[in-house]
Image: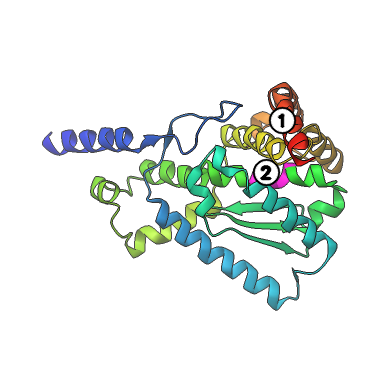
Amino acid sequence: MKRMLVAVFTALMLLITGCQSSTEQGATKTTRKQLLLVPADAINQQSAQAYRQTLVKANRMHRLDTTSPDAQRVLTIAQRLANQVSVFRPDATQWKWEVNTIKSDEVNAFCMPGGKIAVFTGIIRKLNLTDDELAAVIGHEISHALREHSREKVSQQLLQQGAITIVGVATGSQIHQGMAALISQYLFALPYSRTMETESDIMGLELMARAGFNPEAAPNVWRKMAKLQQGRTPPQFLSTHPSDQTRIANLEKALPTVKPLYEAAIKNAG
């Protein structure tokens, strides 16, 4: 009985100490309490290692693109977006941001924790992305990192598995080897939830508007994605991601809030 009470108390303490919000609200009020039990350093360390391995592999296969017009577009757009992150997280301005383009037919892009960005040329070419649309894609991925969605999903999974202790959380002590392996496993194997995807859509919309990219381009990305997939996407209730139509509707609903930010950015740039 005593052990059970201790276990229950420990679980409650984990929930109390681990519930926080990783970002400020911004104009779109994108915030909620998150379960962030795993130290950020542990997540960032695993992510940096995986990112480095991705670049080494791409370079070995002659797919690391540093000179093409696509690569220059990605770099320029990502830098403009990163210049706006302080509205959500002032500390993110001190992240060691990295931006790389990988030659691949894969329709994908990501931003790992700590600001490690990669964009695959497949998503640029197959969707024929304009600069504004590409900003929507990269802004969405940056928002995952700002909101620490990777840290959140790992924390949720480790708590469910009973694999994290109150001592490790409270002290931020060095993660032991077994825990590091679990973090690595959950970090890349688990998909983001619908809530996380929706948050990143809306936060990314605000980010691109503040950077001077037309937010009206964001819904168009998902129209193009729907056309590319042509019915191959599972129904929303079978997927962890919102449907393309749901994403379009959510983005269009948020447009009146961010449009003034875009207009101010354009005015200031002029």
Q: Residue furthest bottom?
A: 60
* Residue 231 in sight in this render: no
**173 relative to 256 in the view: left or right:** left
The residue lying at 68 percent from left, 53 percent from top is: 79
Quadrant, the C terminus: top right
Task: State which quarter of the image contains the N terminus.
Answer: top left
Seen from the viewer's position, the closer of residues 269 and 28 is 269
Label number found at residue 225: none
Marking on residue 139? 2
Report which quarter residue 98 is drawn in. bottom right
Q: Mark 2 is on which residue type?
A: Gly
Q: Secondary structure at mark 2?
A: helix
Q: Is residue 55 above or below residue 236?
A: below
What residue is rendered at 55% in x and 42% in y?
86
Q: What residue did someone put label 1 on?
A: 247
Judging depth in this view, the residue of 234 and 22 nearest the camera is 22
- Determine the secondary structure under disc 1: helix
Seen in the picture, residue 176 relative to 92 is either above or below; the reply is below
Q: Are marks 1 and 2 in contact (CB under 8 Å)?
A: no
Q: Determine if residue 106 is in view.
A: yes
Identify which amino acid the numbered label 1 is placed on: Arg
